Image (tube, helix red, strand yellow):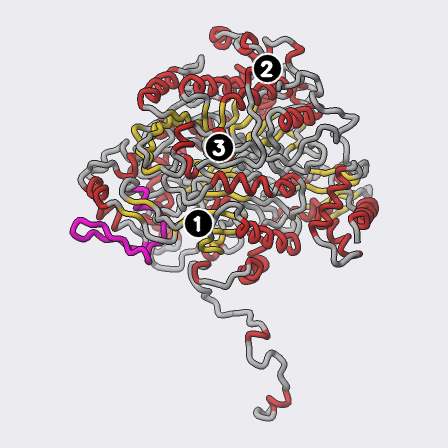
Amino acid sequence: MSTEDYKQVILDHATNSKKTKLYFSDLKKAVQKQYPDAKTRMVKQAATELINDGTMIYYSTGSTTMYGLKGRGITEDQ
Amino acid sequence: MALSTERLGKYDPNNPQENRVTDIGPRHFWQYFPEVIKNNYGKWAYHDILEPGIMVHVSETGDKVFTVRCGGARFMTVEHVREICDIADKHCDGHVRFTTRNNIEFLTDSHDKMVAMKEDINSRKTPHGGFKFPIGGTGAGVTNIVHTQGFIHCHTPATDASSLVKAVMDEVFDYFTGMELPAKVRISMACCLNMCGAVHCSDIALLGVHRKPPIVDHEYIDAICEIPLVTAACPLGAISPSKTESGKKTVKIKEERCMFCGNCYTMCPSVPISDKEGDGVAILAGGKLSNRMTVPKFSKVVVPWAPNNFPRFPEVVDYIKKILNAYSESANKYERLGDWAERIGWEKFFEKTDIPFSEHLIDDYRLAYDSYRTSTQFKFTQAAWDVSKKVGGID
Amino acid sequence: MAFEPKEEQKTINYEEARIYSQEELSNYTEEELKNYKIKHDVPDLDDLEKGPWPSFVTDAKREDLHRKKLNDERLLISKNCVEDLLGQLQLSFDHGETHWKHGGIVGVFGYGGGVIGRYSDVQEDFPGVASFHTLRVNQAASKFYDTNYLRTLCDMWEYRGSGLLNMHGSTGDIILLGTTTEQLEPVFHEMTHELQQDLGGSGSNLRTPSCCIGKARCEWSCIDTQDMCYELTQFYQDELHRPMFPYKFKFKFDGCPNGCVASIARSDMSFIGTWKDNIKIDQDKVKAYINGEAQPNAGSHNGRDWGKFDIQKEVIDRCPTGCMSLENGELKIDNENCNRCMHCINVMPQALRPGDDKGVTILFGAKAPILEGAQMSVMTIPFMKAEPPYDNIKDVIENVWDWWMEEGKNRERLGELIQRKTLQEFLKVVGVPAAPQMVTAPRANPYIFWKEEDVPGGFERDVEDYRSRHKR
């Protein structure tokens, strides 16, 4: 399984989930559902790549940070 | 190298990855140590407090370092930092240090330089006569208050921080510049139950609290917040999904279950909790962090609520003075506030401080039973007689 | 000995780096400051200028006056932001409620922490603070600085931000308070390129670690607090900037059990320096204290006349384990029974010193509220050598993180997870046996959750076999 596979699962999940803001653990669960052996750090690497290529964004409440698909839900400055 | 004065500096918005430096961490500490610190790192033999706020540390090599400790508001401006730098350049070869409790420390390697520096620092006053850099905060006194942002920069506070701290420190100033107390007294301040200030192990803790449940912005909540996150945010499960009459998704709140923590509001702006009449300051006392003689312990709530009487909080300040005065009069040397309260018994604490005890001070959260007295070892105070009278035990 | 940075440290020279000329920096007089009024009416704040303690209001007004007198093009965000902040603060006093809104998505590209969004909800009245975001800047370990660094930071922050800051925030960072969304990236670029300085943590990240002054100026520190703090901060940069944890995670490093950075109350993983050999005694100095030639507790009680120092009453009788005695003028310590509370050392620093065989005690799980209420850290590893590059400690950290990421619920701190899953299970994660040091007393209830493998023959039994001995 490559990072690319994980990225695809994360993307699908972020696009189709009812929630527009996801905890890292939500992403991890989604990946591990499909690839049970996926290591946490690999999932994080995939998520980081999606952040770095601008597909996803971080959303912070200050105390908690979540992931979201850029353009989905509340994403622009208020 | 020079700082950029271009509007966007070195950043190219069309090419955000260009020129990006990441993951470099903090600057390395060693370069910031004064020479006398570098030369004597790990070799310090002992220290003495020469007078309040002034310490000498003596090295095994015979070297000495003199420290002048000054209080300050942790909220400061670059103009103030520049003045700190002026002092550091003039007296300390350009070095300065800040303490965990927001004090500023100026270090020098000679007694004479320290004396000159002290004179300079004491002469720096505001146009209104206050000190810019009050010297103190050592030994058996009250040192600077660690605190949070409050109304200056936070979205969830139940009170303000900077004003409360200023009001308290003005009133206990002599304890900062003196060392008359039985032991050190650490005061801490956090503006809401989130406790960014983590005040829970302080001799005296000031904590902003709400007393009214959140209100729900029904028409907007679904657009602004993720409803599952809001319901999950409540530690007591008091928030559940609901629908408005027009069928919009919203939440409902079981008010009798609310403990006014504000956790929901931190996750969602559509459940505001702050309120002028509801909000105020709780006071906790008797906590400590050090392992000295007794183990670290939590502060206990001694005043469930005092009003947000801006900007000077006279009621809060009055309670603090009552606690400090009673402690100062009756505690033993080296005895921290919480150790004193435990030795004399909390019933005596309330008697000596003249702070009213109420049912709000009896725990009713998890593990509450552990704090109930299950022995006949107690002391009689007026509060005990009031109980006895009420049940006809005495006339 | 000297400690080496991981990367070569760029020399910062303020004269080369500076934005503002000396003339610009001294563009107002004391007289002007005395008579200066901001445009908003702020009676409560004016009141806070009185009194002996340093007034943050006076300081803020000074910054406002200084900004007002700079040329327009010498500031990239609102000239009026400080004045508007004070105006909004007065309004908050009047309303008894804050006027800041939630953050949301502001940050620097690729980082999930370090920036906290902040917007005013009364922007029409106070446009200078309409968007006023916070940046956390990772402080140097134990907060020593030089003026080249600080002055350069000040110029950058006055030019691109409000000129307001916290020295320091509760977790330890330098907090830069207030700039626009546009300036976040430029500030970050100036910081990383010119100041060679990264942001700190926020959100579900490793938060900026912090430490006490340690061996730099304290005779009691048993570990190199700055070096440990620096090494682990550098080693875990990815965890600090990019979230993958269920919630925040804090490291703090205290050099001794006095606990000056409050690690035992404030960090998920508390490192506290300790020693495992004998307290070092200088008997001549003990006599000096007894004879009144040295001041007890380094003079910290000199503000009051507590009477002549009495070693029996003040030290020996106050020892929590009663392990000290005075025999023929010699102080004796039964070190096996010492619990290293530091009281005697604090009282007689010239006579007593921690031993030479030093390391750390590691405790886990402290946090402030909410959920289960406040918790302090649980003593889990009594003693561990702490020497660079701290590989033994990194192994422990990573085991704990892996477990927490696997088992922890969203927004569940490590201490809450330990409580939910039990200390027993946590010990298996760390890979250590149970020890009486981990509890204040053994359990009082006998409801032990025996596991099948604990009992000979296991749980499988045949009821018919039982009935062969016992009638129904």
Q: Which quadrant would residue C104 be assigned to in this image?
A: top right
Residue identified by numbered label 1: C359
The CA span between labels 2 and 3 is: 45 Å
The residue type indicated by label 2 comes to: His
The CA span between labels 1 and 2 is: 56 Å
Answer few, some or many: residues within 10 Å of disc 1's Cα (few below 14, many 20 plus, some between 14 and 19): many
The span picked out in magenta is C321-347
Queried whether the magenta region covers residue B151, the answer comes back as no
Answer few, some or many: residues within 10 Å of disc 2's Cα (few below 14, many 20 plus, some between 14 and 19): some
Tag nearer the camera, 2 or 3: 3
Indicate whether C455 appears above or below C214: below
Asked whether disc 1 touches disc 2, contact meaning CB atoms under 8 Å apart, the reply is no
Queried whether the magenta region covers residue C343, the answer comes back as yes
Indicate whether A33 appears above or below B82: below
Asked whether disc 2 touches disc 3, contact meaning CB atoms under 8 Å apart, the reply is no
Tag nearer the camera, 1 or 2: 1
Tag nearer the camera, 3 or 1: 3
The one nearer the camera, C359 or C28, is C359
Residue at position x 66%, y 55% in the image: C406
Counting residues from the start of the chain, the first of labels 1 and 2 encountered is 2
Residue identified by numbered label 2: C40
Disc 1 is placed on an element classified as strand
Disc 3 is placed on an element classified as helix
Residue at position x 41%, y 40% in the image: B203
Residue identified by numbered label 3: B30
